[in-house]
Amino acid sequence: MSYDQIIRNALRLAKAPRRFALGGEADPKDISPSISNPVSVFPKPQRMFPSDAPVPGGQYLGMPDKQDMTGHKSAVASIGVHPGGKPYFNASKDAVDQTGTAGKAKTKTNLFKQKAGWSWQNAPEGHEDTNTIVSVEHRGKHYYALNAHFPKGVDFARYEKAKSEPRLRPTTTGDVFLGPQAGTISVRGKEHPVYHHVVVKADGGAVGYASGGDVDQPRQLDDRGFYSAAAEAARSLPQAKGSPSQMMATMKGVKPSELEWSGAGKAFADQKTVNRDDLA
């Protein structure tokens, strides 16, 4: 394997979303976060308001009293579709000062309707007639799922200046963790996996089950199933930029032999500085 291939694999590893190793079928009741003081939310799009009383961008309405919750920072939330295709958006009325994890990438979520240009290639059992799924946008890439969970909360964000729908996109910051693949869709001719669930949370730690207890977060593997301590250590560096030797010297828990095998030293030998993402 060439040094360029090694570096490309390391970069892909650092940016890839993590997967839960749950073993077999997952149940939304098991992975979904417990929601205190819950409310069912209806994102009412701009087009559903009368022309003589428009609401640019639409509103998030707390049901059944239709209270305007736009801008609410919910402490915890879940969005998805039940078997049979009925969407749900359950959130806590409890507000927080900040949702997600500071410093992490922004994640935007919306429901993705079949009329927007997708079709089932392999539908999960009970979802053969489902025509709406969840789309989670993270670092410019879309991940599709039946359920999306936000144990660190989500902002009821409105993007009224967007050129088209959706303008109501629950937004937070964090890392994306993918559950088991549930099916496959084709989006304008290109196949994409549909995951049973996506969880947006802080990196590391564990995800709490609704019934109590924790699930240990597995190590991140590359496309071939290999784990790199060097890539993980690079992602955890407290310093964002420095000389290659300085950055590699502060990577904890990495054997010199792995650094030598990775080819990082030679790859960055001619650079005066290197940033954390490139090194990872």
Image (tube, grey):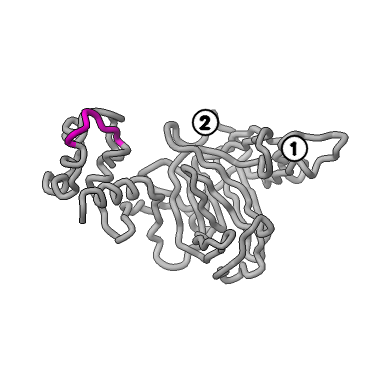
Where does the N terminus fall, quadrant-wise?
bottom left
Instruction: Identify the residue at horizontal 41%, vertical 52% (top origin).
Output: 213
| Nearest to the observer: residue 97 or residue 38 | 97
- Dot label at residue 98: 2
Type of residue at label 1?
Gln
- Dot label at residue 218: none
Residue 50: x, y in percent? 85, 40
Q: Is residue 176 left or right of residue 90?
A: left
In terms of image quadrants, where is residue 81? bottom right
Q: Is residue 223 left or right of residue 124?
A: left
| Residue at the disc numbered 1 | 67
Type of residue at label 2?
Gln
Q: Are marks 2 and 1 in contact (CB under 8 Å)?
A: no
Instruction: Identify the residue at horizontal 42%, vertical 41% (top origin).
Output: 202
Magenta-span inclusion, residue 121: no
- Disc 2 crowd rating (10 Å Cα; few below 14, some 14-19, many 20+) is some
Instruction: Identify the residue at horizontal 45%, vertical 35% (top origin).
Output: 101
Residue 94: x, y in percent? 60, 36
Q: CA distance from mark 2 to mark 1?
A: 22 Å
Q: Which residues are magenta?
A: 269-276
172 up-or-down from 21: above or below:
above
| Nearest to the observer: residue 149 or residue 251 | 251
| Nearest to the observer: residue 63 or residue 120 | 120
